[in-house]
Amino acid sequence: MLSTIGIPGLILILVIALVIFGPKKLPEIGKATGQTLKEFKSAAVDLTKDDEDDPKIQDKKEDKNA
């Protein structure tokens, strides 16, 4: 997704964000976005880990492999 934007597009987005939010608010927004992505990733890992531990799903996987 980001590969289609390119460097000039990213620079334009950063300049617009800087104008809209200002230099003081921009680092706070970046930090909040990073924390949100980190929590989302850990939740996704937990969900997939729960699926691996579920015996019903394990039985279905074994049936497909047999």
Image (spheres, helix red, strand yellow):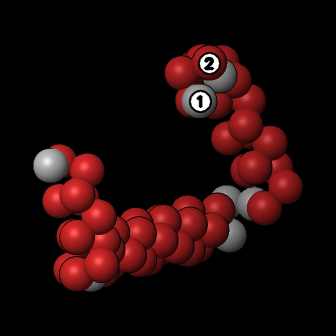
Q: Position of residue 59 (x, y in %)?
A: 22, 70
Q: Residues within 10 Å of mark 1 (few under 14, many from 20)?
A: few
Q: In this view, does 53 lie to the left or right of 2?
A: left
- On the image, which quarter does residue 38 sit in? bottom left
Q: How many marks?
A: 2
- On the image, which quarter does residue 43 sit in? bottom left
Residue 38 seen in this snapshot: no
Q: Nearer the viewer, residue 23 or 46?
A: 46
Q: How crowded is mark 2: few (under 14 residues within 10 Å), some or many (20 or more)?
A: few
Q: Residue at x 30, y 71 (%)?
A: 57
Q: Which of 45 and 11 is in front in this view?
A: 45
Q: Is residue 48 left or right of residue 33?
A: left
Q: Nearer the viewer, residue 32 or 42?
A: 42
Amino acid, disc 2: Thr
Q: In this view, does 49 lie to the left or right of 62?
A: right
Identify the residue position indicated by label 1 in the image: 1
Identify the residue position indicated by label 2 in the image: 4
Q: Position of residue 22 (x, y in %)?
A: 75, 60
In the displayed structure, 55 sits above or below 19; it is below
Amino acid, disc 1: Met
In the displayed structure, 38 sits above or below 10; it is below
Q: Is residue 32 left or right of residue 22?
A: left
Residue situated furthest right in the rendering = 20
Measured in 3D between alpha carbons, the distance from the residue under mark 2 to the one under mark 1, in whole angstroms, is 6 Å
In the displayed structure, 58 sits above or below 17; it is below
- On the image, which quarter does residue 7 sit in? top right
Task: Label 1: state its secondary structure.
Answer: loop
Task: Label 2: state its secondary structure.
Answer: helix
Q: Are marks 2 and 1 in contact (CB under 8 Å)?
A: yes
Q: Position of residue 26 (x, y in %)?
A: 64, 62
Q: Which residue is drawn at 38% across and 75% down?
A: 47
In the displayed structure, 62 sits above or below 52; it is above
